[in-house]
Image (cartoon, rainbow, N blue to C red):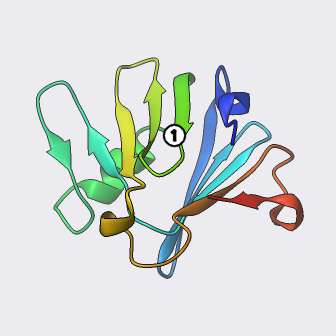
Amino acid sequence: MDISGIVGEELVAVEFVQDYLQLRFDTPLLTLYVWPHILFSEYSLAYGEPEYRNALCSLIGEKVEEATLEAGDSLTVKFENDTVIGLSLREEDLDGPQAGAYSASGSVSDQEEF
């Protein structure tokens, strides 16, 4: 699946929905059913750690520099400030059959799961 549509897009909202996360860009929508890691140059944060949510929210207003989705391996979203949102898509790291979904139009009705 190609998620390159978010490259150059600004993150406009971070939505915490019970047990999943939605990242809204100017138009596209990235939904993650597994909590990603946030990677900074000096350290990383995982779900449940102090400042995790604040770190995600601090990315609002940042533009995406690179975005890759390698089926069965990983999802990586790198922002212009060098912060990376990373998620393992390896079967042994997932709790269910899907790790997330992507919608180029921003509508949940046409999103593709991965």
**Measuring 75% from the left and 43% from the top, which residue is drawn there?**
28
Q: What secondary structure is marked by label 1?
A: strand
Q: Where residue 22 sits: x, y (%)?
A: 59, 60
Pointer 1 residue: 70
In this view, the residue farthest toward the left is: 42
Q: Is residue 36 above or below residue 34?
A: above
Q: Residue 70 versus residue 48: which sits nearer the camera?
A: 70
Q: Quadrant of the C terminus?
A: bottom right
Q: Where residue 54 sits: x, y (%)?
A: 33, 52
Quadrant in the picture for residue 17: bottom right
**Taking 10 as reference, is 62 left or right?**
left
Q: Residue 37 versus residue 55: which sits nearer the camera?
A: 37
**Measuring 51% from the left and 40% from the top, which residue is drawn there?**
70
Q: Is residue 42 above or below residue 76?
A: above
User: Does residue 82 appear anywhere in the picture?
Assistant: yes
**Measuring 81% from the left and 43% from the top, which residue is drawn there?**
104
Q: Residue 95 versus residue 11: which sits nearer the camera?
A: 95
In this view, the residue farthest toward the bottom is: 18
Q: Amino acid at mark 1?
A: Glu
**Taking 41 as reference, is 89 left or right?**
right
Total of numbered circles in the picture?
A: 1
**Measuring 37% from the left and 43% from the top, which residue is drawn there?**
86
User: Does residue 62 appear anywhere in the picture?
Assistant: no
**Taking 64 as reference, is 105 left or right?**
right
Q: Where residue 66 sits: x, y (%)?
A: 52, 22
Density class for disc 1 (Cα within 10 Å; few <14, some 14-19, many ≥20) is: some
Q: Where residue 39 sits: x, y (%)?
A: 26, 37
Q: Quadrant of the N terminus?
A: top right
